[in-house]
Amino acid sequence: MTDSHKGNYCLECDAKNGDCSDTFKYTNDSNKLRDSAIGYIAQNGSSHIENKTKHTENRYISSSNACRMSTMTAETPKIVSFDQHTNPFVFKCEMDFFRKIRTAIFTIFIVPCRLLIITSLLIIAWILATIGLWGLTMDDLNVKPISGWRRIIQVVAAQAMYGMYFFGSFHGVKITGQPQATSKEAPILVLAPHSSFFDSISVVLFGPPSVLAKAETASLPFLGKLINFTQPIYVWREDPNSRQNTIKTVIERANSRDDWPQIIIFPEGTCTNRSCVLSFKPGAFYPGVPVQPVCIRYPNKFDTVTWTWEGPGALKLLWLTMCSVYTRCELEFLPVYLPTQEEKNNPKLYATNVRNVMAKALGLPTSDLTYDDCKMMIRARQMNLPHFDDIVEIEKLRQKIGLTLTSIEEQVVASSLVHESNCIVSIPEFALRLQISVDDPITAELFRIFDTEMSGTIDFREYLLCAVYLIKQSVPTMDLMQIVSRMYDNCGKGAGRLTRTALVHLLKHTIAASIDECVDIFADIDFERRGFVTIDNLREYFESKPEFAHLFEIPTTAKKTTQSSTTKPKSQ
């Protein structure tokens, strides 16, 4: 996996991206979500859409040379509450029989020719970049914008790069909307939704502008020279002050009197499947200068460009794209957004309002779901946690009611007071055990998630298992099992003894084991026929089996910290 948009770097984003994504369509007239994804779709499933009618007053400045100001009111787009059925970071790309035949034919006869032309153009662009950078050091590139004959060569190199896209099947690139503003009118270009490394076509079409890039990309063969020629703002990931230094550089360039090229930023911070517009990172909005939003669309019948972290890899997408007759891409320039004084003082408000404007123009809902939320949800699904599809909502409700600020759930689990005989509770008992108000609507909402049969009672262990998972996201699965095993000990009163039935309950919701698999594991461990196994027996068994090695690894899908989300708002 590589970071989003490959050579480019999304400000404040350290998230890895992958491949392709599920396509989810929305009907603009009714704002209802229509599931069209393959993978996480459930039969007759539907998403819950929260209709926010809040209005924000957005002031714009015209992108013409006259910079005529206007004022308009934009309705806040619909906000989607996502579950696993509408994961914006997932996509599966499937071809029908006739497309497979055409792909095979193109692979044999067309792709080799396209690769030859693309390679030639890449070499030409690299030679031009090498000439343009001759005699310049990295310090020179950071201090003063390129001008004169170097600037001319830069534009020619960008045209050669565009030729690579053109011969790679991007024949239908369309630029619509307002004229592109100058760097003085809008120092920053904000692009969304960010869904592919092919979004980098904007870099060769728009000037070229400067990009945000990881420092290590400077040493990449061929691409390093080309990226350097855009005078990028490099992000040094090993430097703890990198984020602050990057924002400082953006502010300096945006407010400089020199003729710096515009800075292009993908504020979502990661790639999605274009089913929604994620929260914008505030980095692009700290300077408080006007920005010009640019909407990206790929109106293709067969999607070969979308690249998220679960789906086809980059090489497969490149291959499928070059096997296409043509690939359409639309880039729509919206009017330059002129921030109010309040937005200048509050970059997060500025980012949110710009996102709302872009979401309305795209006809898409917005989502406060983050990349970390989806990683958390995917791991919960892989473990088969109870109600894994609601895990993000459970975490938000825990935050709202203040449970994330206490350790009550861990104390309840550690006390061994919850077991088979007393795990079924009503809402008053639920509130009492968690020391929260039974009259609080959030308590009822949290309880309702687990009361799927509307019986008025739930298995309290299911809630505690989800809560411990949310608290201990950074611990290996085996350690998580050891923590919650006390709740399934129905024969030893907290001594750590698990009957076959108890083991089934434990493994079903921690490693997604089937009943047959659980029975086999129990039989292998309990060879003395004692009728129970201990958690230590289980650990030793898993340690002896290479196929269970992942249970002892720190999960890569865990959030950085759970506590950080309790002190900071999720939208950025």
Image (tube, helix red, strand yellow):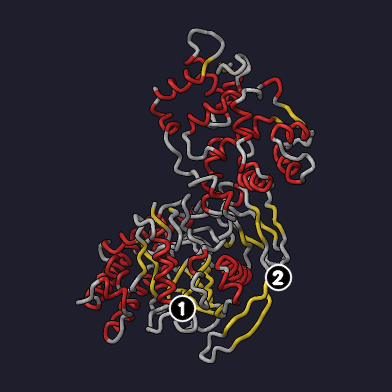
Indicate the amino acid at tag 2: His
Indicate the amino acid at tag 1: Pro
Rendered position, 44 above or below 290: above
- Helix or strand or loop: what does disc 1 sit on? loop
Mark 1 to mark 2: distance in Å?
A: 27 Å
- Residue occupied by mark 1: 187
Q: Quadrant of residue 315?
A: bottom left
Between residue 26 and residue 466, name the one nearer to us. 466
Rendered position, 514 above or below 406: above
- Residue occupied by mark 2: 55
Q: Residues within 10 Å of mark 1 (few under 14, many from 20)?
A: many
Disc 1, disc 2: CB below 8 Å?
A: no
Q: Quadrant of residue 531?
A: top right
Between residue 317 and residue 241, name the one nearer to us. 241
Q: Quadrant of the C terminus?
A: bottom right
Name the residue: 76% across, 35% down.
453
Between residue 558 and residue 28, name the one nearer to us. 558
Question: Please, which residue is most extreme toward the left here?
Answer: 135
Name the residue: 37% across, 74% down.
162
Q: Position of residue 431 (x, y in %)?
A: 74, 36
Q: Is residue 154 visible?
A: yes
Looking at the image, residue 36 sits to the left or right of residue 14; the answer is: right
Looking at the image, residue 456 sits to the left or right of residue 201; the answer is: right
Name the residue: 53% across, 88% down.
64
* Of the image marks 1 and 2, the number of the one nearer the N terminus: 2
